[in-house]
Image (tube, rainbow, N blue to C red):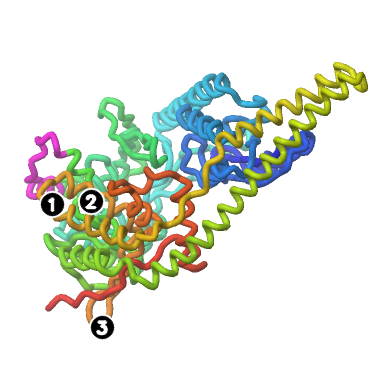
Amino acid sequence: MKVAFYARYSSDNQRDASIADQLRVCRTHAEKQGWSIVEEYTDHAISGASLMRPGIQALIADAQRGRFQIVLAEAMDRLSRDQEDIAGVFKRMNYAGVRIVTLSEGEVSHLHVGLKGTMNALFLKDLAEKTHRGLRGRVEQGKSGGGNAYGYDVVRRLDANGEPIRGDRTINPMEADVVRRIFRDFAAGLGPRAIAFRLNDEGISAPGSGAWGFSTINGNRLRGTGILNNEMYVGRLVWNRQRFIKDPDTGKRQARPNPEAEWVIQEVPELRIVDQELWDAVKARQASVSASRDTRDTSSPDHFREKRRPRYLFSGLSKCGCCGGGYSMISGTLLGCSTARNKGTCDNRTNMRREALERRVLDALRHHLMDPDLFAEFCAAFTTEMNRLRMEASADIGAAESELKRVERDIQRLMDLYLSEAISIETVKERGSKLEARKAELKEFLATAEAPPPLLHPQMAEFYHRQLARLHDMLHSDLDEKRQEAAEVIRSLIEAIILTPSDKGLQIDVRGDLAGILTVASGSGQTKTPGRFRTGVRDALASQVQMVAGEDNQRYLRLVDCEIPRLAA
């Protein structure tokens, strides 16, 4: 039996050696069972509350390819602590004909998934509540509830038992002077962007030793973030303004505001940095600026959805080729390097019109993406890889069929020996049960073994062009729904749009997921995002992109490489 190990530790209270310990006990168990170890999958310092882990994703993908028949872990909570996720892992493994075995629970069944999944979810909930309760108690004593604001130092001292006393802070005089300067400059009429430029020019380190930026200073008034909104600077500790919830699909944390009634507020006058008069002057100017800008109608029921939707076709995808920062809207029509504009630490001052970028990229995708030489190279690599996969799949199926015949012969031979009174009924039961179990495993594997993925259709290039042209036409449709659908597909296929200044203007380098584009192109005329396609075909296509792109760029290919003229002064 082929077995794969999975080990994980979170960043809470464990150490990296925990991985080695888990693998060691799994290896000992596998050797006792006589299993053949195929692979070891690990995730270091990653929470088990989400499946967005490279190790577990690789494990699931390889299970679907039939690389092993058993997954062995120390306990179920190593695979996942989330009820939905552990059920999903179990369902996928069951479909692939792979058993899950743990040292704590034995072979995992539906009962284990239901009970242990609930217990693990309750453990996470209880742990979060206990942690929150402990932090609240610390805040009510005037101590830090986590993190440290700019302008303060952590006080490191021990109690009578030699244990560290946590949560104490003291004012950092040099940083406090910078905080007061920011407040004075803003009250005097300077904007956050101009303040950030001056601080960076003078070489003053920002929080986290990075560069000062607009958001570092301005932050969000409602959430109390940013230098200008931190009430700690007037000796007022405000905690529990917001909570964090994990997105069930991405595993990323999202902030949600808490009602003001749930805030914990504690006066800490010894930590005041800014006097009340200066604080009030800053708040008055913020209110004035906010009132002049807040002219949008937020009463529409579509306001929230429109706010979350990308405002422009390539929002968040355009990057500066000089510093790696975002190319964002700097006016109603122009895109520019946000790092150069907000921090002044990038020399790229070349701007471009948003409509020009969208038109140039879309036209290039439509007319130049399917280069004949590139497509021929891709098809050759694809065919070679598909032949290899077909041979591997055929070899696995052929080996299973041969072993099944051998097991059936052994069962028949065992019965013949018993009928000739050469062996006892106890021996028949002992050996026969193992042979029957193996026979059932082989039959299940053969019944669920997938056919090798199909080769590219001879008319793929022509169909590819038609699909891209169809997406282009949908973007210019009179129906908003069609335009949005096409925009979402195109955005999902583009990794980044790199904009680099040149003598003539801006060099545009669009890097995209060619495997995803081919997957969309093979979608029988239906426009879908790549994530909805069958994993096996998607992985096979992705492996071809790696072969065509080479070792230096294993995931993405340059899809567009052109220049756009510099704007007239």
Looking at marks 3 and 1 on the same chain, the residue that comes earlier in the sequence is marked by 1
Circle 2 packing at 10 Å, graded few (<14), some (14-19), many (20+), is many
Image position of 329 (left or right of 491): left
Q: Quadrant of the C terminus?
A: bottom left
Q: Amino acid at mark 3?
A: Asp
Do the residues bearing badges 3 and 1 touch, measured as CB atoms within 8 Å? Answer: no
Is 111 located above or below residue 209 in the figure?
A: above
Residue 375 magenta-highlighted: no
Looking at marks 2 and 3 on the same chain, the residue that comes earlier in the sequence is marked by 2
Identify residue for label 1. Answer: 477
Do the residues bearing badges 2 and 1 touch, measured as CB atoms within 8 Å? Answer: yes
Q: Amino acid at mark 2?
A: Ala
Q: Nearer the viewer, residue 176 or 434?
A: 434
Q: x%, y% of residue 565?
A: 19, 77
**Distance in Å between CA atoms under marks 3 and 1:** 36 Å
Indicate the secondary structure of the residue bearing disc 2: helix
Q: Amino acid at mark 1?
A: Ser
Q: What numbered label is drawn on residue 486?
A: 2
**Distance in Å between CA atoms under marks 2 and 1:** 10 Å
Is 308 located above or below residue 97 in the figure?
A: below
- Nearest-to-viewer mark from 2 and 3: 2
Q: What numbered label is drawn on residue 503?
A: 3
Determine if residue 181 is in view. no
Circle 1 packing at 10 Å, graded few (<14), some (14-19), many (20+), is some
